[in-house]
Every structure is written in C-alpha cells, then in structure tokens.
Image (cartoon, helix red, strand yellow):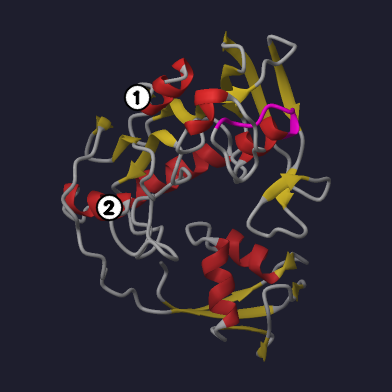
C-alpha cells in the first residue's frame, strides 16, 4: 500500500472518484479505496467527498494512506496440497470446506493462516493484512486450483493476467438433470440480486459473464460437466448453470429441493476448479496445473 499523503490533479473528466482512484493506484482494491474515502482520508477540491463524487478536469484530489500495520494473523501449521511452487508463487489444491482468507465469522483456520506458516511470512502484501498473497479466491465449498503470489511483482502480473483474461480456468461440476445439447455457451450478465443481497443473479444490470460448458458424463438424474469461464464474476458458474435449469448438485443457495436419492446427500456444492493455466509472471513460461477430483465428488457422482 502506498502509505502517506498523495496530491493528484485530474487531467480530464474521469467519472466516479473511487474508479479514478483505482486507476491511479491499481494495486489497491476498490473496496479499500472506498473505505479510505468513507473514513475521511480523501478530499476533492479541498472538500469532503464520497466515492460517487465526480472527478472533473483540473480537480485536485488528496488521499492519505495509513502506514502499514504489522500483520496480526497467527500462522497455523496444517498441511497444504501444493501443485506448483517456486520463489515467486505457488498453486494449491484447495480442499472443500476451507475458507481462503479471514472475514466475518472466519477469524482463524483459513488458507491464509496456513500460507503464513508455510511461506514463513514471505507473501505479497498487495492484498492487505487479511489477504496476503491472495490473487483470486474460491468459495469455501469449492475445491481445486488456487494461485498465490509470494512477491508484489508476481502479484501485480498475475492480477493483470486475470484482468486481461489470459488465465485459463476449467471447472468440473455435477449438475441436476441432463442437458439436451452436448455443449453450449452461457453469455448472460451477472449482478447482485435486487432483494437477496447475499445472492447473485442473471440481470441486465450486471457485468458481462461468459461460461462455456460441455457434458463429460450423463448419469441419469445428474450429469458431469466441464465449465470454462472467460470472466470471473462472483458465483458465476453456479448462477449460470442454475439459469440453464441445471443447478449444481448440493448448491443450497442456487439449487432447489429435489428428491434425487443418494445424490441429495452431497454436503456441499459439487464444483471443483479442475485446471488452471497461466503465464509465469517472471519467466513467462506457461504453467498448467490440474487438481485431482476430490473423493466426496467421486462418491456423489457414483451416488454413494
């Protein structure tokens, strides 16, 4: 984080303050910048402002970043399944049921706590105190490939790869029913649900989202699909497959109650980040990782 007070002048009309600040400080998340504005650490033209204030040509913006605080998270020693590792980054096979980083209701026993122990604190600081090294995330109950940055240069390059969509992401999903077609594309915008704010939904007011899918195996009441996502919207695959009429097995948020014999005993959504490929941020060598299908997904597939 760029600590200290910064004095900036807009060269042209730039729209919302939080978006403009994110362009000036791309290593800082929008939510973190919004928090600084909300806490009164930013002024626009010498006046107090909010994140939605408009920045116009010639406007002077001052923003103060607090000095970084020493990490207060305690490293925890529990095993990590590492698919690739060097001095710049590592790729993990995240088990289901593990939260990636601390948050509301999850102050301990997250993947970050284990990473702090494994990496001896040598993780990128761009994500802040609670998200060191975290370039992207998986839901608690989604398993599979997750890349972590050890250095700030690696973090910046990996984040750019995700933004420019040069990262290949392939998932496996067990879904209810059998799609009529062997493959297809779902090109529908995804945004926050208007009423149930903890959910996402297909909405014209959402952000563009593209998911390609194909049937790998038809199993009667359920099917195994491979899904490739070209965007990284929250809950994208789960929302898209539900909109197709084939929600992910075990998904209590976007699925619906069904009497489907042993398959309804799945203890989580049956979604697995199967393959991840990207250009190494330093060597530019293509890195391709594959996480084996977890046992609970295999059991659910067989109806056991």
Closest to the observer: 153 or 95?
Answer: 95
Residue 164 position (above or below residue 103): above
Inspect the magenta stretch and tell me whether residue 245 lies in it.
yes
Closest to the observer: 227 or 224?
Answer: 224
The tag on residue 123 is: 2
Residue found 76% across the figure and 41% down from its top: 189
The tag on residue 212 is: none
16 relative to 113 in the view: left or right? right
Q: Is residue 218 visible in the rendered structure shown here?
A: yes
Q: State how far apart marks 1 and 2 are (Cα).
A: 30 Å
Q: Position of residue 212 (x, y in %)?
A: 65, 22
Q: Main secondary structure of the magenta part?
A: loop
Which of the two discs, 1 and 2, labels the residue nearer the N terminus? 2
| Quarter location, residue 43 | bottom right
Residue 194 position (above or below residue 261): below
Q: What residue did someone put label 1 on?
A: 295
Residue that protrudes farthest toward the bottom in the picture: 47
Quadrant in the picture for the N terminus: bottom left
Inspect the magenta stretch and tell me whether residue 172 lies in it.
no
Residue 137 position (above or below residue 67): above
- Looking at the rendered structure, the secondary structure element under dot 2 is loop
Closest to the observer: 174 or 116?
Answer: 174
Q: Position of residue 46 (x, y in %)?
A: 65, 90
């Amino acid at each position: 984080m760029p600590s200290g007070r910064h004095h900036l002048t807009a060269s042209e009309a730039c729209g919302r303050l939080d978006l403009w600040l994110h362009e000036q400080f791309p290593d800082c998340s929008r939510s973190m910048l919004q928090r600084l504005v909300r806490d009164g650490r930013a002024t626009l033209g010498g006046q107090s402002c909010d994140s939605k204030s408009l920045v116009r040509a010639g406007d002077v913006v001052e923003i103060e970043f607090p000095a970084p605080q020493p990490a207060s998270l305690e490293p925890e020693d529990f095993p990590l399944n590492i698919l690739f590792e060097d001095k710049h980054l590592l790729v993990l096979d995240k088990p289901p049921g593990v939260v990636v980083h601390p948050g509301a209701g999850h102050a301990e026993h997250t993947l970050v706590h284990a990473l702090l122990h494994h990496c001896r604190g040598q993780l990128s600081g761009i994500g802040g105190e609670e998200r060191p090294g975290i370039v992207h995330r998986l839901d608690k109950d989604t398993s599979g490939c997750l890349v972590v940055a050890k250095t700030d240069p690696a973090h910046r390059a990996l984040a750019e790869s995700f933004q420019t969509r040069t990262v290949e992401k392939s998932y496996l999903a067990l879904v209810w029913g059998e799609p009529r077609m062997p493959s297809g594309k779902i090109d529908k915008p995804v945004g926050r649900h208007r009423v149930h704010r903890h959910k996402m939904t297909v909405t014209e007011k959402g952000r563009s989202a593209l998911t390609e899918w194909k049937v790998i195996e038809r199993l009667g009441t359920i099917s195994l699909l491979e899904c490739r996502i070209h965007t990284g919207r929250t809950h994208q695959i789960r929302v898209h497959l539900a909109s197709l009429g084939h929600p992910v097995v075990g998904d209590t948020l976007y699925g619906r109650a069904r009497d489907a014999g042993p398959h309804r005993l799945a203890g989580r959504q049956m979604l697995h980040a199967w393959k991840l490929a990207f250009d190494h941020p330093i060597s530019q060598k293509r890195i391709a990782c594959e996480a084996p299908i977890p046992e609970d997904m295999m059991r659910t597939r067989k109806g056991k």
